[in-house]
Image (cartoon, coloured by chain):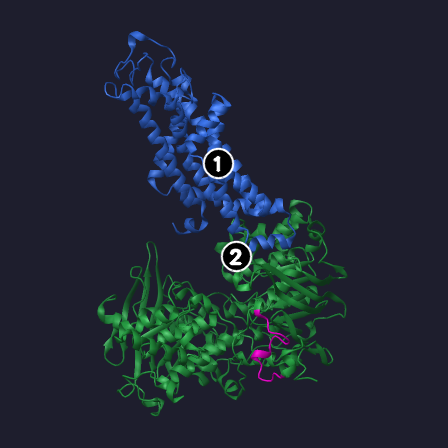
Amino acid sequence: MAEKMNINPEENTGNQKIQAETTRKEEKKIIEVQNLKTEFRMKRRTVYAVNGVSYYVKAGEIVGVVGESGCGKSVTQMSSLQLLLSPPAKITEGRVIFDGDKDILSYDNDGEEIRSLRGAEIAMIFQEPMTSLNPVLTIGEQIAESVRLHMGLDKKEARKRVIDLLRLVNIPDPESRYGQYPHEFSGGMCQRIMIAMAMACNPKLLIADEATTALDVTTQAQILETLQDVVKKTNTALIIVTHNLGIVARYADRIYVMYAGRVIESGRAEDIFKNPQHAYTIGLLNSVPRLDDDKTRTLVPIEGMPPNLQKVSEHCPFLPRCTQALPECSANGVPVIEERGCEHFAACYNRNLNKAVHASKDVLETKTVSEEHILEIKGLHMGFRVKGKNYGGKTTLKILDGVDLYLRKGETLGLVGESGCGKTTVAKCILRLYTPTGGSILFKGTDLTGLREKDLRPCRKNIQFIFQDPFGSLDPRQTIGDIVGEPLKVHKLVSGKEAYNNRVKELFEMVGLDYAMSSRAPHELSGGQRQRIGIARALASEPELIICDEPVSALDVSVQAQILNLLEGIQRKTGISYLFIAHDLSVVRHISDRIAVMYLGRIVEIADCDQLYNNPVHPYTKALLSAIPIPDPEVEKARERIPLLGEMPSVSRRPEGCSFHPRCTFACDTCSRKVPELVECESGHLVACPVMYK
Amino acid sequence: MKDKLFFSALFAKKIVIVCTVILGLFVLAAVFAPVLAPYDPAAISLKDKEVAPCLAHLLGTDSLGRDVLSRMLYGARISLSISLVSVLIGGISGMVLGTLAGYFGGVVDMVISRCADALISIPPIILTIAIGTALGQSTLNIMIAVGISSIPGNIRMMRAKVLSVKERDFVTAARVIGEDNKWIMLRHLIPNCISPLIISVAMSLGGAIMAEATLSFLGIGIQPPNPAWGTMVSDGMRYLETKPYLALIPGFAIMIIVLSFNIVGDALRDALDPRIRGNS
């Protein structure tokens, strides 16, 4: 630890980098933003993206900025550094004081002064690590570049510093990885490199803008742990911009909740989660599924969408979506942010907000799961033939290596695992978009694997698919009415124009859309509406099984709750079965009856939802559950964290024996020799780990 | 509603309206050539030869005393019809072959693409001349020759677009629904891939007139006494020093029409893209 801290030979005896012995309260404000206003002036309209935002961050403090997309989170951060392109962006008001005496907004936006701040004293990490790195330079050269530019070190010193930095962000074997190119690193590793690069010049402030959104839950946890570790060691201020409430609950000291370009609530993490003082904050908390949820909890989505920022609202911007509005909300202007407690501020007229989680699921409407197996997968193998020197000539990449699953009529089976473990491949095999290389897929007794495309087509209407990307899965040239009606035409399910229109209308109503919209094109809809169209299309042919591949991961939290509730409602009404693929275990827990955990093309554990969450057996399941943050700082503090070592290897280098053993803390000799089989440890709970269950 | 949006986007710029009007006038002139033309375009009158533009002959007469205005009007018929038909031949075959190659891949792609490569390796003008010579001289054959020479480019464009679009989720969605290949290609791939082709076709209308002009200029296109613009330029070339208007008038007409086609094609591209259309 002591050596790692010493990454700062010149400065660590200096004034500002005193270790965090002093208490937080005495720390000085690293950045203070006062009444910042930013607008985008376009030809025909002006978008008021930031409307008077004030915040501060102290040294060594981790501050979370949360809110739905389009709430001005990122624009605020970009404005404070003058990183927005001007025109169209224009900062109309406000002051940004950095490090006590530097007034950033008074600097020329491309001048010497601000450039010496950016990258050196203030650093940023973005969402896409792969595109942020230059593919033709080695990672060492790229980090060294900023060290040499800002710190004036020579080549040799720079190299030494880069290696220290790589060590700081836990990249194993930094000396040899110095000379490697970005493509030789995984997404998680690239994000570590971005952190190293950001930390290169000992910045006083680090801004992570959705830095872990594109990563797997396990990698996300690793990266955030690293970040937390690094900033606490170096006493750097950190701003985490995210839409994930769990992340801020786990890592942030203080939180700013943003809505419509304003901060509507701010305070210490515990206060925000325990005693929220704004209707929007409460709405957000009620709309996210939690890992420690009661199974009967219903998500309460925030209806409607964030406001169009083309005009400055006269009242509270949340008013149109607020369920707890008072008469004075519509009578008075925009509420001012006021103190509600120690360091706790909120802008809401209603002082007696109902914080209770709303109604639980209607008991009468419980769904019925029959014992009939609608889908049965046995020993499913899928391989791709590949060529290339990385694979040692020609070989077959085994993506799936013997998957056994069954799905009962009317139930939801969750399928979870890190990306690249083969979840989507299973889905594509069931849909016969891929032809499996081995095993059988029995759908109501018919083996789909052997069917020819022509014989398969009539079966297709019984198994449908909901895509992750609500943008790419709708034909941009068709109207949404045509999209929903297409399966009807293909399978000739209705006769006559009138029957067709009625059925399309019925489908629109089923997914909660107005039929009057049916002549619109997909690009005119919001992400949530598009996903509803995708669901309506899947429902059109009255399938018995719908495979949902990450159906909510591209959506905002409030919309996510709407879609999850919709899927649950449809299931109760029609008795349809879902295979629900997702990486977010709290979402999967919320919707699933049973859950299967996959690792590198094999199922490692299957159990009833509650069994799995209360009593996970496989070490991988445990680590996966531990990686999911719960949006509640108190619960978070009490949780045991089980770190996951390293990263999932590529299928081309599948370890012998149990594929998980190199990352497993419980691994013994037999694990590396024999592939463990799924064994039933209690009724309906199967696990492939002989060490944990004998 | 949708069409209204399309047209308002198409004619957002004044220059597009001007060009469309010009193209419209040319088409009208071609259609009503027999009514509009003051003289028989093929009537030789040696005593009136090489008359400069005057009231009797608005655009003058050529070396054989034929009225240039009448020849221009009749020439518009030939030049416009050749360009339209040849471009349609090239566009439709390119679209069909390119879609098949892109969608099916494998052997189908191999055969179609290699044939296209073979065609593309021959300079287009030589290819057109070769086809024109092989088929013999007739208006239809010129159309075919000019059309064929534009097929390889269209195949490549369509194939590349299909390759990228067929990987998109909505095509997978169509397969999941149970649509067959024909349906997927007709309803999803072609509508989503066709806009670059439409634009390229609109732009190559100008090119086709040029190709016809080149062929006629080289003496294997439209044969006298039929008045095609290209032939007229080639005839006029000989008198460039003494009677420059003989080559300049048809040359100028070709220039205007090519330019108009290009500008309209450009506007068409923007108007066909719903994303650009929404912003403009």
State the residue in front, A199 or A430: A199
Q: Answer above or below: position of A555 versus A542.
A: below
The image position of residue A402, as x and y in percent, is: 68, 68
State whether residue A210 appears in this view: no
State left or right for residue A631 relative to residue A609.
left
The quadrant holding residue A41 is bottom left
The quadrant holding residue A30 is bottom left
- Which label is found at residue B119? 1
Q: Residue at x 43, y 37 (%)?
A: B202
Residue most toward the top? Answer: B47
Q: Of the residues shown, which amino acid type is indicated by label 1?
A: Leu
- Indicate the colour of chain A: green
The chain to which mark 1 is attached is B
How much space separates mark 2 and mark 1, taking CA atoms? 35 Å
- Indicate the colour of chain B: blue
Q: Of the residues shown, which amino acid type is indicated by label 2?
A: Gly
Q: How many marks?
A: 2
The image position of residue A263, as x and y in percent, is: 38, 74
What stretch of residues is rendered in magenta? A653-668
The quadrant holding residue A612 is bottom right
| Residues at discs 2 and 1 in contact (Cβ within 8 Å) | no
